[in-house]
Amino acid sequence: MSSYLLLKYLHLTLVVISGLGFLVRGTVKLVFERELMHPMTQFGPHVIDTLLLASGLGLWTYTHSSMQSWFALKMVLLVSYIGLGMTAFRMRERQHALTTFALAITALVSVAATALIKPF
């Protein structure tokens, strides 16, 4: 198997792990209103997301992609997802936190859709 395919499958696996982890953490904290005290919920997402970003940049470098419009949109959506996710976990009012969490999930799905479809 080529190094490109290995990097691509690593990236896709990390996307799924990151997204599922975010959904689980958000559901536990915001829906079930339980504190996330396990050490893996404290530093695990940072490790996974750092590897995800590194693999994404590796794929971008490997393919020698120029800065295309779809990639710029993906980066804006990614920053939105991160910001909304952090905000949702820090909000005190539950209803606003749930709404922000839903917006973060929408941004995450939009990042994946943009990567798959490459609309422009």
Image: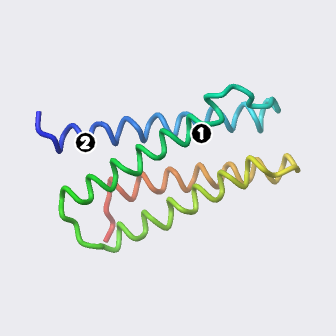
Q: How is the image coloured?
A: rainbow
Tell me where residue 43 appears, x and y as whole percent: 60, 36
Tell me where residue 50 appears, x and y as whole percent: 46, 47
> Between marks 1 and 2, how big is the CA–CA gap?
22 Å
Q: Residue at point 34% right, 74% down?
A: 69
In this rendering, the label closer to the viewer, 1 or 2: 2
Q: Residue at point 55% right, 56% down?
A: 107
Kind of residue sitting beneath label 1: Phe
Label 1 Cα crowd, 10 Å radius (few <14 / some 14-19 / many 20+): some
Relative side of 6 to 116, left or right: left
Relative side of 81 to 111, left or right: right
Q: Is residue 97 above or below residue 30?
A: below
> Of all residues shown, which one is farthest toward the top?
38
Say which of 101 and 47 sits in front.
Answer: 47
| Residue identified by numbered label 2 | 7
Disc 1 and disc 2 in contact, CB within 8 angstroms: no
Q: Residue at point 32% right, 57% down?
A: 117
Q: Quadrant of residue 10?
A: top left
Q: Is residue 21 above or below residue 53?
A: above
Kind of residue sitting beneath label 2: Leu
| Residue identified by numbered label 1 | 22
Q: Quadrant of residue 82?
A: bottom right
Say which of 90 and 104 sits in front.
Answer: 90
Q: Quadrant of residue 115?
A: bottom left
Q: Earlier in the sequence, mark 1 or mark 2?
A: 2
Quadrant of the image containing the C terminus = bottom left
